[in-house]
Amino acid sequence: MAQEKIVLAYSGGLDTSVAIRWLQEHYDAEVVTLTIDLGMVDLESIRQRALTIGAVNAVGIDGRQDLVQEYLFPALQAGAIYEEQYPLATALGRPLIARYLVEVARSEGAYAIAHGCTGKGNDQVRLDVGVAALAPELKVVAPIREWGMTRDEELEYARQHNIPVEPSNSRYSTDENLWGRSIEAGPLEDPWNEPLEDVYMWTKPLQDTPDGPTYVELEFVQGVPVAIDGEEMGGVDLIHQLNGMAGEHGIGRIDHVENRLVGIKSREVYEAPAALALHTAHRGLETLTLSKDQVRFKARMAQEYADVVYNGLWYTAHRQDLDTYVASTQKHVTGTVRIKMHKGSCTIAGRRSPHALYREDLATYGQGDTFDQRAAEGFIAIYGLPVRTQASVHGRAGAVE
């Protein structure tokens, strides 16, 4: 009788390499690995490593386009930034990984999927809940949650089973995709310790950044970035290019003590040059094209959207409902924003839109002013009526008794 199959999300690192053999032993299953390129992966070398260790099949998927169009840009349109700091790079990649795991499991006839998440992180929730939403019939296996091995024990297991691994010498735990890098553990676990330069790979220290600023024009169509300095390009290339440009100026470093879903606080360092620049520009364009009420309500909604993403609830009706509202707000968010990048800062230097609600003839104090200042007296009389009424009945607010 043929063995049952498990599809393992495979990064090529120590944990998931050991997991191939561990799943074979403890679940008596054939293991199919799935490696996904979300921006920074050498698919072929990782596939070959999985086959060498003993996977019966090693699947590689270039998921960059799906990531950008279906996850990153919708979150950008929503303005989703967790706790006003984290642009959600890792969190936005996990539901796509869950989707691919389900697709491969079904094509391979697997009864379960497996991942390398620990029992105290957010990613286990995002993957487990994502799979439950898409394919509730599939079992989810999390070897690291089950086996309880230390890093040294994993290395010994790899040695005993002739598993070829190249343990990292890094003091940190990292994850990255097009939208950003997340770095944790090691010296960063003490929130008093300032991050050292070896934490960063995409952003230059301020002393090494250019002395003069760089101005960049970002063009948006309905809230989606489509061009840099007049050159139209696809989302993957646009983010990649902007990561380099903003990182050159030291933009995108984030040091955040955040509240994890599992109930603990965690000190996380992020690098997200393009994400920070695009969020800055997008907000600037919205201030020009949305009404006051839209801007203010959308800011509250953005926090809710960020929580939904962070908490692993992408595949829910609630997120779909939020997307419907976001899509409505973005109908007129079309135009160009000029940003200024200099010494770690990204600020708006100019913005324009064919749908701008800003009108110079109403705002100007010079010639061409069309605002009827005489109308202000009647407006103030009506606006201040409840204030005058209450003051006459209850007395002046704040008066000393």
Image (cartoon, rainbow, N blue to C red):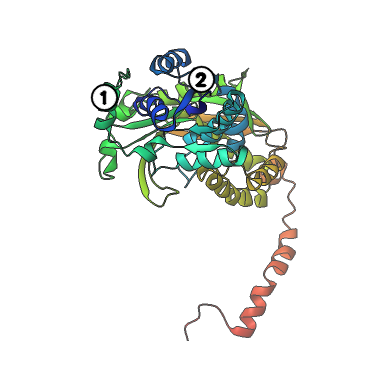
Above or below for 290 versus 195 = below
Label 2, secondary structure: give it.
helix
Q: Residue at x 58, y 41 (%)?
A: 314
Residue sitting farthest toward the bottom: 401
For residue 266, side relative to residue 74 (left or right): left
Label 1, secondary structure: give it.
loop
Question: Does residue 365 appear anywhere in the picture?
Answer: no
Q: Earlier in the sequence, mark 2 or mark 1?
A: 1
For residue 271, side relative to residue 236 (left or right): left
Residue type beneath disc 2: Gln
* CA–CA distance in space, label 2 to label 1: 29 Å
Q: Which residue corresponds to mark 1?
A: 169
Q: Which residue corresponds to mark 2?
A: 241
Q: Position of residue 296 (x, y in %)?
A: 61, 51
Q: Position of residue 117 (x, y in %)?
A: 42, 36
Q: Depth check: give the residue in front, 130 or 380.
A: 130
Q: Characterize the local packing of mark 1: few (<14), some (14-19) or many (20 or more) Cα atoms within 10 angstroms.
A: few
Above or below for 383 versus 243 = below
Question: Does residue 133 appear anywhere in the picture?
Answer: yes
Q: Nearer the viewer, mark 2 or mark 1?
A: 1
Residue type beneath disc 1: Asn
Above or below for 210 versus 44 = below
Q: Which mark is residue 397?
A: none
Q: Position of residue 114 (x, y in %)?
A: 47, 32
Q: Position of residue 221 (x, y in %)?
A: 68, 30
* Residue 196, picture quadrant: top left
Q: Depth check: give the residue in front, 116 or 347.
A: 116
Q: Depth check: give the residue in front, 383 or 162.
A: 162
